Image (tube, grey):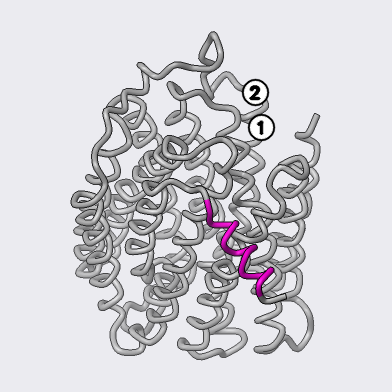
């Protein structure tokens, strides 16, 4: 039994290119400093800063707006100059901007530098997604993206877990660590990942014509549905920690552990599960089930008398839904691309998540402030379940 389990894990990671592994290592270094995002709302609403939940939600809205426009530019640049220089530049400059943002204390400056930071940071994502597609094969592409997600989530577990303890010392430390890990990731890329002569326009497409992502109606529908789902999902990292602190009275270290458990579960389960499921059923089947589970997890927050045990149960449920849906969302968008328009498709997919960073946290914060957290969880849980049926309809 133990031998069979070991073989399953070994096979799940076998056959991926060394560049894919290196990209994942770079992502792991970068994301190990992920502390600002999960604690930004708590930071802004702390006695030290004194802003309201609504004002903090507006800052997250600007974070999403910057990410949306940065993703668009990142996709354009990726299709023009290639994925390597875009990744290197955005990692380094993003690191500097994290450290600068930590020094900003007035609301206008916080808003301005939050927008600039997210603009630069999110320009990285279309380039990174295109790089993973370039270094992977069709038969292991979902696993290549899952490995990248694994790095993100291990980093998330380390960053948010450590961030809970650092926040007890000083919130400013979070910005320094986040910035330094960004810069470290850029240095590793510069030293160990060789630039490639990737000129997207010169790549041979498998199809005679290149369809623009903006003319692909089915893909645009997928993008809209994904944005609705992501608007709900982002509550996990923004308004949920505030709910845990203000309504359930959990300590900051315990909130950090809850957030970290999401990444730990993904690290243990995701690659093996994707290895078992890949190619067995329609991609949209898994996405539908996963999105439905995320919706159900948010509804769990309205169970009367919810405490630490049920909070862990909610995190487990939302994590399983995330594992089933998100790797296959990557597989779906990449399946509709050609090398010469991959950055454009990647940008639109990233933009859907970036727009959700505006709509989700900002709208959720306003709803929680004026109608209460119960209404927020009923709303996002119900919307998630509705979007799961929309994903199912895309099969035709």
Q: Is residue 181 above or below residue 229?
A: below
Q: Is 325 in the magenta? A: no
Q: Position of residue 213 (x, y in %)?
A: 53, 24
Q: Are marks 1 and 2 in contact (CB under 8 Å)?
A: yes
> Residue 341 versus residue 204: which sits nearer the camera?
204
Residue ranking furthest to the front: 3
User: Residue at 71% across / 48% down in the picture?
Assistant: 287
Q: Position of residue 262 (x, y in %)?
A: 57, 71
Figure quadrant of residue 184 = bottom left
Q: Which residue is mark 2?
A: 217
Q: Residues within 10 Å of mark 2 (few under 14, many from 20)?
A: few
Q: Is 11 in the magenta? A: yes
Q: Which residue is mark 1?
A: 221
For label 1, the SS is helix
Q: Position of residue 66 (x, y in %)?
A: 37, 47
User: Residue at 51% across / 76% down in the picture?
Assistant: 260
Q: Main secondary structure of the magenta part?
A: helix
Quadrant the C terminus occupies: top right
Figure quadrant of residue 49 = bottom left
User: Would residue 105 be visible to someone looking at this image?
Assistant: no
| Left or right: 85, with 148 as reference point | left
| Left or right: 95, with 270 as reference point | left
Region rendered in magenta:
3-14
Q: Is residue 348 above or below residue 57?
A: above
Q: Which mark is residue 213?
A: none
User: Residue at 41% across / 83% down in the picture?
Assistant: 164
| Left or right: 38, with 359 as reference point | left
């Amino acid at each position: 039994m133990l031998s069979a389990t070991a073989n399953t894990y070994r096979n799940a990671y076998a056959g991926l290119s060394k560049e894919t592994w290196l990209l994942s290592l770079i992502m792991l270094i970068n994301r190990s400093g992920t502390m600002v995002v999960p604690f930004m709302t708590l930071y802004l609403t702390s006695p030290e800063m004194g802003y309201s939940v609504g004002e903090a939600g507006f800052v997250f809205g600007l974070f999403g707006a910057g990410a949306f426009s940065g993703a668009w530019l990142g996709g354009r640049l990726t299709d023009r100059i290639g994925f390597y220089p875009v990744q290197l530049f955005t990692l380094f400059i993003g690191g500097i901007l994290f450290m600068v943002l930590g020094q900003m204390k007035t609301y206008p400056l916080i808003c301005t530098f939050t927008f600039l930071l997210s603009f630069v940071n999110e320009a990285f994502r279309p380039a990174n997604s295109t790089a993973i597609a370039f270094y992977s094969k069709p038969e292991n592409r979902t696993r290549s993206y899952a490995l990248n997600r694994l790095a993100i989530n291990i980093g998330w577990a380390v960053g948010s877990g450590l961030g809970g303890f650092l926040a007890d010392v000083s919130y400013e430390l979070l910005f320094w660590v986040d910035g330094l890990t960004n810069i470290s990731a850029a240095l590793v890329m510069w030293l160990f990942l060789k630039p490639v002569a990737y000129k997207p326009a010169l790549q041979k497409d498998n199809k005679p014509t290149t369809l623009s992502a903006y003319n692909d109606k089915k893909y645009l529908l997928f993008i809209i549905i994904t944005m609705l789902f992501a608007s709900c999902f982002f509550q996990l990292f923004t308004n949920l920690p505030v709910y845990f602190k203000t309504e359930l009275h959990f300590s900051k270290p315990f909130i950090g552990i809850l957030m970290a458990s999401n990444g730990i579960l993904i690290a243990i389960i995701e690659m093996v599960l994707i290895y078992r499921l890949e190619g067995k059923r329609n991609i949209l089947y898994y996405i539908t089930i996963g999105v439905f589970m995320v919706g159900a997890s948010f509804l769990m927050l309205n169970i009367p008398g919810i405490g630490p045990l049920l909070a862990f149960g909610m995190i487990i449920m939302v994590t399983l839904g995330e594992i089933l849906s998100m790797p296959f969302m990557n597989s779906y968008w990449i399946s509709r691309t050609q090398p010469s328009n991959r950055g454009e498709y990647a940008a639109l997919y990233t933009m859907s998540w970036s727009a959700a960073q505006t709509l989700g946290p900002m709208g959720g914060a306003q709803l929680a402030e004026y109608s209460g957290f119960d209404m927020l969880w009923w709303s996002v849980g119900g919307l998630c379940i509705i979007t799961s049926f929309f994903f199912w309809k895309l099969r035709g």
